[in-house]
Image: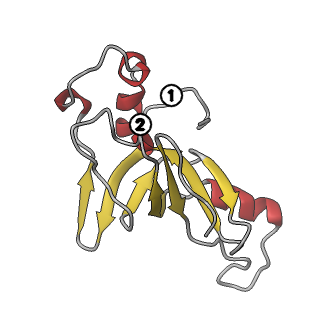
Amino acid sequence: MSLKALGYRMLIEVEEVPETTAGGIILAQQTKDADEAAQEFGRVVDIGEFAFKEYPAKWCKVGDMVSFQKYVGKVIVDPETKKKFRVINDIDVHCVVSPGRVVCAPPVEEWPPNSKCSVFNSGAANAALYGESRGTGGVL
């Protein structure tokens, strides 16, 4: 794989969207693209060097299955394997999902606010954790 997460971003492997329905109907490319953008789960493949630096602990690691908001991040294709990945910000991870349990990110109130950090000043951390719209349209 030739992709690497940079900065505070994470590289997430998402499932391939099927080309046909269970009944055998072939899906249009536009429908597949919409379904792909709406995915909410994926496996962490890489974590940037600055991800989670502003928080007391990382709440996920490489290999974890995580949940994130629909339409967040950017979908990219690995030029070598042709697999699709999503690049998202560290704060956009809502929880780690494992068989039989879900571990959510800690509430923002437990983190010591850092006045130099625009995430805390803008309320984006609360929005990411509690599903409120940030108004950024998922732009990195």
The image's mark for residue 128 is 2
Give the CA distance from mark 2 to mark 1: 8 Å
- Picture layout, residue 135 above or below residue 12: above
- Residue 53, percent from left and from top: 33, 37
Task: Name the amino acid type tagged 2.
Answer: Ala
In the structure shown, which secondary structural element does the residue marked by tag 1 occupy?
A: loop
The image's mark for residue 36 is none
Q: Badges 2 and 1: C-beta atoms under 8 Å apart?
A: yes
In the structure shown, which secondary structural element does the residue marked by tag 2 occupy?
A: helix
- The quarter of the rendered structure image containing the N terminus is bottom right
Circle 2 packing at 10 Å, graded few (<14), some (14-19), many (20+), is: some
Residue receiving disc 1:
134
Front in this rendered view, residue 131 or 77: 77
- Residue 26, percent from left and from top: 79, 78
* Rendering quarter of residue 25: bottom right
State which tag comes first along the sequence, 2 or 1.
Answer: 2
**Measuring 64% from the left and 65% from the top, which residue is drawn there?**
2
